Amino acid sequence: MSEYGPEVRTGSGALRGALKDGVASFLGVPYAQAPVGALRFRGPEPAVPWEGVREATAFGPTAPKRPYAPPLDALLPDPEVAGDDCLNLNVWAPWEGSAPAAPPEGGRPVMVWIHGGSLVHGSSSVPVYDGTAFARDGVVLVSVNYRLGIEGFGVFPDAPANLGLRDQIAALTWVRENVAAFGGDPERVTVFGESAGAISIAALLASPLAEGLFRRAVLQSGAPMALPLAGARRTTEAVAARLKVPATAEALARVDRERLLAAQTEVTGKGSPLTGGNSFQIAVDGEVLPRDPAEALAAGASDGVDVLMGTTTEEYRLWFVPGGVVDRVGSFTQRLVLWKTKVPSRTARVYRAGRAREKPGEVLGALATDKLLRIPLNRLADARLRSGAPGGTYLYEFGWRSPVLGLGACHALELGFVFDTLGLSETRALTGPDAPQELADAMHAAWVSFAVTGDPGWRAWDPARPVMAFGPGTPSLVEAPREAERLAWDA
């Protein structure tokens, strides 16, 4: 370590970071060139090497994006850092003196975080995602920025698809090639993400281009999901139509970026997780993703990778409660939405019967949570069990209820517990001031244990359907929770 801060040498050049309480941080490290000019709407190219020592003490530029719309903007922090070099990552590592803290033989476990945000929001600089606690507990933590919206997930006739996924693969390749310099073991990489980050990881599990880049995966509130190219292209076409230009990368690259973001926001602003509408989705493109990831994983793709996955109990409350949707939905609207989304009437009857005291909007939300998340993840776990997958399979559910705005156990609530960042004001926007630290201790420790050993500390998936319930109350293993509702989807 120099007198100015810890230093490390990567394949592109030397970095100088910051050191605090035995944890070194290196922020805004480029893993690929800025996707501008001739590289805009093109696959990521390796970062250009630099001379001398590069300062790495501030987060790098975020991908072009717009803030969350009210009222979510007050609940989900989404900082924006200006600049073109948005293909960057951050590293937190245990550190002693001038070098990584003496790692075990072969290096420390590595965890790579892929943020969520519906593929149009988010970044690695969200304070909730601070990697200090993971490094404190012996893990090298890496968090990644990737292209969002039309620049990351647009579908064009004249440019590669899934550029955001290609960015993630480039970042994982950088980790494999460079993480040993930070004390990490490139053979013990766990990739983890939430929401769109978890959907991305499901695609990476099914992608031949990501094979061998990680050993374990955590899917938080996101299931395998992708569209055929033609379906994924519709949002690109809608944005181009609003701008009155051809739906090509060449034409859209000539549009002022602010105009492009404004059109993207107008086109996607009214979509919802249940009813659809225009949104950016991962595409089955024949290269990054040769087939639908749900089908590929059910057929045995990445069956040697250890997988930990789960949901919050009331995912829907983040989508339905802040704007009042949960109170506006009556019985007629509920039935209309269920018909439009092809939820079988017999399935809905089971939910209504078991939730007789709940509002129609709450019953609809429970159906949405299970249709989009819990049921697909249960089916994936069952497929891995049937095939005798050598990789471990573990399920969890996060059930502690936030008092903020009546959000309950909503989507994204578990993030501050996983990262052990409950003390931050940005985390408390969603949790309130009195979130139980002991629950964060348990959940964070389970994620660390999974990265270290492949076992989060409870029984692997078996025919009794064990699920670790993180709240309400003390964490406990529950077998087959809400089984009648789950079975209603198979009727």
Image (spheres, rainbow, N blue to C red):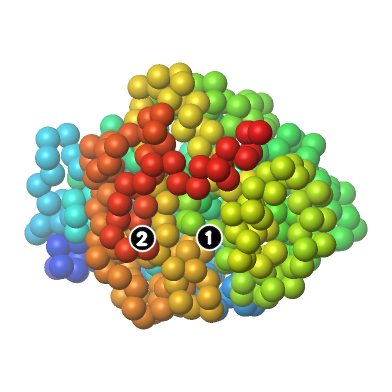
Quadrant in which residue 224 is drawn: top right
Q: Residue 448: percent from the left, percent from the top? A: 26, 49
Residue 279: % across, % down? 72, 53
- The residue labelled by disc 1 is 314
Q: Is 297 situated left or right of 399 in this image?
A: right
- Quadrant (top left/top right/bottom left/bottom right) for the C terminus: top right
What is the three-letter code of the residue carrying label 1?
Glu
| Picture layout, residue 363 above or below residue 436 | above
Q: Position of residue 195 (x, y in %)?
A: 53, 53
* Residue at horizontal 42 percent and vertical 60 percent from the top: 399
SS category of the residue bearing label 1: loop
Residue that appears at 46% across and 77% down:
403
Query: Is residue 406 or residue 269 the one in the foreground?
Result: 406
- Tell me the residue at 51%/64% (across/down): 410
235 sits to left or right of 201: right
336 vs 100, left or right, is right
From the viewer's side, name the closer residue of 251 and 304: 304
